[in-house]
Amino acid sequence: AYRAQGTPVVATDIGDCRSLVGNDGGTIVEDADNDDALAEAVRGWLGRRAPHVVRSWGDVRDQILRLW
């Protein structure tokens, strides 16, 4: 939902976040315990939008099945 609206995502490298966020949908922070890196990632996106990505439910299903 965030990507479809162009809202960037800041997440830690846990689970499948990296593949779900993609290369241009936000920032993945390697160390979840690094508060400074998380804050810097958020600051880096302030006032910016990520490219809109609209996917069908079939696209979402296929991506989930690939990750699973």
Image (cartoon, grey):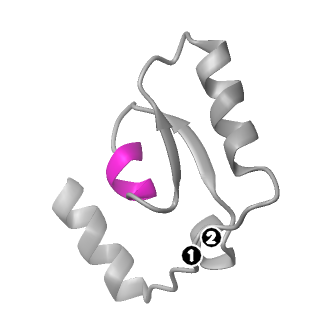
Q: Is residue 30 left or right of residue 42?
A: left
Residue 46, placed above or below residue 29? below
As measured in the structure, the alpha-carbon distance from the residue carrying label 1 to the one carrying label 2 is 13 Å
Quadrant in which residue 60 is drawn: bottom left
Seen in the picture, residue 58 relative to 31 is either above or below; the reply is: below
Q: Residue at x 58, y 69 (%)?
A: 3
Residue drawn where x is 57% and y is 12% of the image: 34
Question: How many other residues sit within 10 Å of disc 1, few (<14), some (14-19) or many (≥20)?
Answer: some
* In the image, farthest residue toward the right: 47
Residue drawn 69% across and 67% down?
49
User: Which residue was labeled with disc 1?
Assistant: 51
Tell me which secondary structure the magenta stretch mostly adopts. Answer: helix
Which residue type carries mark 2?
A: Ala
Residue 57 locus on image (x, y percent): 42, 85
Report whether 61 appears left or right of 28: left
Residues marked 1 and 2 touching at CB (< 8 Å) = no
Q: Position of residue 2 (x, y in %)?
A: 65, 66
Magenta highlight range: 17-22
Residue on which disc 2 sits: 1
Q: What's the residue type where badge 1 is placed? A: Pro
Q: Residues within 10 Å of mark 2 (few under 14, many from 20)?
A: few
Q: Is residue 10 magenta?
A: no
Give the quadrant of the N terminus. Answer: bottom right
Spot occupied by residue 7 in the image (x, y as percentages of width and height): 69, 64
Quick check: 5 left or right of 9? right
> Residue 55 appears at what percent x and percent y?
45, 85
